[in-house]
Image (tube, rainbow, N blue to C red):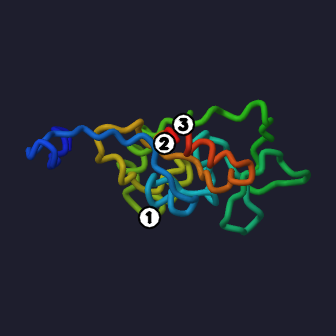
Amino acid sequence: MKEGLLVWDAVTHSIIRSHPFLAIVAADGPGMTSINGLVGHSGFLGCRVYCGVKCRHKAGAPIYYPALLKPSDFEVAGCDHASVSVMDIPRAYSGDYSSNLKKLVEESHTETQYKLNRKLTGICKPSILMGLPRTFGVPQCCGLDLMHLGAMNLTDLLLGLWRGT
């Protein structure tokens, strides 16, 4: 694929070499986790745009929630970090995906190490998109869930703009 994709051109009756570029991959939340390799919305670092905001969970519960404000009298080990102001949310894709993936792959020799590294990096596996040579990179090429923007007709507007209709 690095040399290009051979495609039959029916107009010229010849094979041409194409260099496709993958700009945006779209899927719903659960589907995107199988594409981008991130832990998903219920993980400790569950932000879909890999911003690095830590989530919290109830005592004894395995599912994390993106609660920015620390609840009163909340003392759950590993989840009792300070509140995060909406104004201080890190920008999208501010996490170092490449070095975190390297850490996950190279330092996870046992199941226990893997689970800890998965929690600390927000990555559960390498993305299937990493084999493509021409993309914006993972997770930057993974778009947000546009289905939930339908109430504002934004999805229809953006798709029309992108398609030139």
Q: Where's residue 56, x and y in %?
A: 73, 54
The mark found on residue 163 in the picture is 2
Amino acid type for the residue under numbered disc 2: Arg
The mark found on residue 72 in the picture is none
91 relative to 85 in the view: left or right? left
Mark 1 in CB contact with mark 2 (< 8 angstroms):
no
Q: Pick the residue in front: 107 or 87.
A: 87
Q: Pick the residue in front: 62 or 38.
A: 38
Judging by the rendered image, the residue that carries numbered circle 1 is 111
Q: Where's residue 131, x and y in %?
A: 29, 47
Amino acid type for the residue under numbered disc 3: Gly
Asked if residue 62 is positioned above or below residue 107 in the image, the reply reads below
Q: Residue at x 54, y 50 (%)?
A: 122
Q: Pick the residue in front: 112 or 1.
A: 1
Amino acid type for the residue under numbered disc 1: Glu
Q: Residue at x 74, y 53 (%)?
A: 151
Q: Where's residue 141, x and y in %?
A: 46, 42
Q: Residue at x 75, y 44 (%)?
A: 81
Q: Secondary structure at mark 2?
A: helix
Judging by the rendered image, the residue that carries numbered circle 3 is 95
Q: Earlier in the sequence, mark 3 or mark 2?
A: 3
Mark 3 or mark 2, which is nearer to you?
2
Asked if residue 58 is positioned above or below residue 69 in the image, the reply reads below
Q: Residues within 10 Å of mark 3 (few under 14, many from 20)?
A: some
Occupied quadrant, residue 98: top left
Q: Where's residue 10, x and y in %?
A: 15, 49
95 relative to 21 in the view: left or right? right
Q: Which residue in the rendered view is the most extreme toward the left?
A: 14
Q: Residue at x 78, y 45 (%)?
A: 68
Q: Earlier in the sequence, mark 1 or mark 3?
A: 3
Q: Residues within 10 Å of mark 2 (few under 14, many from 20)?
A: few
Asked if residue 58 is positioned above or below residue 88 in the image, the reply reads below
